[in-house]
Image (cartoon, coloured by chain):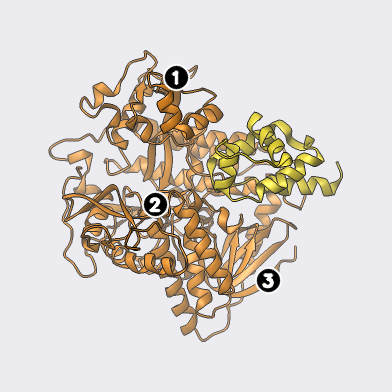
Chain colours: A orange, B yellow
Amino acid sequence: MNVTKRTFDAVIVGAGGAGLRAALQLSESGLKTAVITKVFPTRSHTVAAQGGVAASLGNSEEDHWHWHMYDTVKGSDWLGDQDAIEFMCRKANEVVIELEHYGMPFDRTDAGKIYQRPFGGHMSNFGEKPVRRSCAAADRTGHAMLHALYQRNVRANTQFFVEWMALDLIRDAEGEVLGVIALEMETGDIVAFQSKATIFATGGAGRIYHSSTNAFINTGDGLGMAARAGIPLEDMEFWQFHPTGVAGAGVLITEGVRGEGGILRNSAGERFMERYAPNAKDLASRDVVSRAMTTEINEGRGCGPNKDFVLLDITHLDPKVIMQRLPGIREISIQFAGTDPIKEPIPVVPTCHYQMGGIPTNYSGQVVAPRGSSMSVAVPGFYAAGECACASVHGANRLGTNSLLDLLVFGKSAGETAVEDVKKSTRAHKDLPQEAIERTLARLNRLDTQKDGADAHESRLAMQRTMQNHCGVFRFADKLKEGVSKILEVQQDVQRIAIKDKSKVFNTARIEALELENLIEVAVSTMISAEARKESRGAHVRDDAPDTPERPNGRDDTNWLKHTLWFKEGNRLDYKSVKLTPLTVPTIELKKRAY
Amino acid sequence: MDADRGARLRRLRWHCRRALLELDLMFQRFWARVGDDLDADGEAGLERLVAMEDHDLWDLVSGRRETDDPQLRSIVERLRQA
């Protein structure tokens, strides 16, 4: 098959917040920049972010980047790299004010400054009391951010390839990344994008779980491509869960429902949170509630024919209160759970929300991988930012409003580094290795010609159920072990998926099969990394690593204060140390994470 | 169904991939129920609907906002019934 070649200085895959911020840096510096995206840029999942973006502007009360850094290190359960965290917190004001200048309609104080609101985990004076640090544009912060960045990119002549799916990295024998191969959905054509800099900003892969708040586009395409090209994935065992997603759908039921008096009940109708958190009860922290729900389900007290969810009950509330204060929730429950919460409780389960791990990078946005005796050597020509990347600022758990900040800071940083690298390179584009292109064509050909293969829908469901049941919010040694064999079996099926529709134009069956080939890499890396980490830390909580005086919260710093690296080849694991030395300030010393 | 219409419907189906899970789920059910039986008027309405911004679309679909436009009202109603 003849593959057309297009040549750019830089190619960015993904047009969410991180991709658009990186693209802007490249286009405004005069480089010929392409952005490849599966959906129109302002339909990227960044739109769903409501909470705001963290920056210690101090507009409402005293604040300091060093306090923000402390909160982020603590939130990460000390797995975050302290150089990257200092970098992000120090850069926060700059990137937020830049965005303001791009026309982002932030909420304002009476004095005309950016209004800031408090958000969980963000404190003043090294954990003393809550601080107002989140900058928001009503409840549409992500949406407003994408629009501001997209318009600025149009002005800067960024070239968008909308409804294109990147299939594979092009990497030569020396390990240099020379671009990507992509599929144009409209025609089915395959095009090689040759570039001096390739930036991945493809977002998370929350669709590996059966219950996920993530939109359908979040299929970990960047992670799949990186893994196939021999790049390891870092800290994939760490996923943030929200306790109350609608069972079977994943749509979030806000904490506000429990705030208004909502009660969690098991199959016996018992208000079980009284046993797990006698004081806070249903208003205990997210991880405590999620673990209690999982324990109830695992011990056979779940509801429904499969006993696989619990109930969130607001039937005792005055219907007027529900209609006035929780109208959106009533609609969500009717639409996605089939129950009117005025009359019946809502079925809920802990639901996957955010991926902390990803493609390993440094704070300059360069992708790094082991080489020789060093664990972190920059991969020439390759950069990553946002949820697909692991800088690592979120470590074992992310603070709310730090994800939008991550997009801006590391999108910009990856863009800046790529600009420097491209401008200092004096040689022409390297020739593309034909064997890399052949590998992708063979993958496509296999999909089109597979006989008696596996069904994509069934394989996806098997993957999602395996992840949910064996590697959910609360983890058990035997279930993880069993989960590893099961997910490897599902992987075998995915490798022999067949599609009936062979058409060229907008063949969604082919696209979904290709997405599944990416998702399965993420699922396998998650299960294997989680099975191996024999401690509890942040969002990775194991039943066999409980809270003891020697190991607070089950965290084992002696053996496990290190980043996991999973390699696709042979499902091999390696580990690298956490960067505990910040750029300019003293190390934030290890202590128990308690709020 | 002719090849052009098939391609047009597949394209429309891809445009139902949204930024918000709520919308993805609504459209998924809609296609499972209606599939290739979508009539010309439904197709035209859906084309207009998917051109909207996600939050505005969700406001319409979830009943937080109403529309006076009969073509949009009809397709929103079908979406909600699915």
Residue B58, image quadrant:
top right
Whether residue A367 is visible here, answered yes or no, is no
Amino acid residing under circle 3 = Lys
Determine the chain carrying the residue at label 2. A
Residue A216 against residue A92 in the figure, above or below? above
Rendered image: mark on residue A357: 2
**Contact between labelled residues 1 and 2, with CB atoms less than 8 Å apart:** no
Q: Is residue A147 visible?
A: yes
- Mark 1 belongs to chain: A
The outermost residue toward the top is A268
Q: Distance between the residues labelled 2 and 3?
A: 33 Å
The picture quadrant where one finds residue A484 is top left
Task: Kindly state the secondary structure of the residue where label 3 is placed.
Answer: strand
The spot of residue A166 in percent (x, y) is 60, 59
Mark 3 belongs to chain:
A
* Depth order, front residue of A241/A496: A241
Q: Mark 3 points at which residue?
A: A5
**Residue at horizontal 57%, vertical 58%?**
A41
Q: Name the residue under label 1.
A: A307
Q: Considering only order in the chain, which callout, 3 or 2, is on the residue closer to the N terminus?
A: 3
Where is residue A587 drawn, in percent x and y?
A: 18, 61
Please tell me whether mark 1 sits on a helix, a strand or a loop.
loop
